[in-house]
Amino acid sequence: MISYYELLGLLKDSKQPKEVKLHLKYDSAVYIYNNDNGSYLLKNRFDEDNQSIFMYLRDCLLDNDSFDKCIEIIENE
């Protein structure tokens, strides 16, 4: 498990994983890296109806959550 801050470091070094899974207190969701805009987008759109899951990975976290180890790397590039 890594934090969002650590994920940003991987992005900076062009070592971003293709898929990650965000683990929140009551929910989880898989995100896929989008080369077109350099962000992680929700893999399964039907999950977007959930109150705590948003289209973009960054929108699911508050600034103080960025250091919590809540992201699981599923698949590396």
Image (cartoon, rainbow, N blue to C red):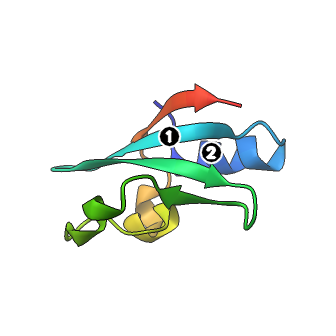
Rounded to the nearest whole Å, what is the CA distance between mark 1 and mark 2? 10 Å
The vertical placement of 10 against 60, above or below, is above
Amino acid at the residue labelled 1: Val
Counting residues from the start of the chain, the first of labels 1 and 2 encountered is: 2
Secondary structure beneath dot 2 equals helix
**Disc 1 vs disc 2: Cβ atoms closer than 8 Å?**
yes
Q: Residue at x 39, y 42 (%)?
A: 70
Q: Is residue 71 left or right of residue 52?
A: right
| Residue 63: x %, y % from top left | 47, 68
Q: Residue at x 45, y 71 (%)?
A: 59
Q: Residue at x 62, y 50 (%)?
A: 33
**In which quadrant is the N terminus drawn?**
top left
Q: Is residue 6 left or right of residue 61?
A: right
The vertical placement of 53 against 31, above or below, is below
Which numbered tag is attached to residue 38?
A: none
Q: Which residue is mark 2?
A: 7
**In which quadrant is the C terminus drawn?**
top right
| Residue 64: x %, y % from top left | 43, 63
Q: Residue at x 22, y 70 (%)?
A: 49
Q: Is residue 44 left or right of residue 56?
A: left
| Residue 23: x %, y % from top left | 32, 43
User: Pointer 1: residues within 10 angstroms few (<14), some, or many (20+)?
Assistant: many
Which numbered tag is attached to residue 20?
A: 1
Residue 45, quarter of the rendered image: bottom left
| Extreme residue in the right direction | 13
Secondary structure beneath dot 1 equals strand
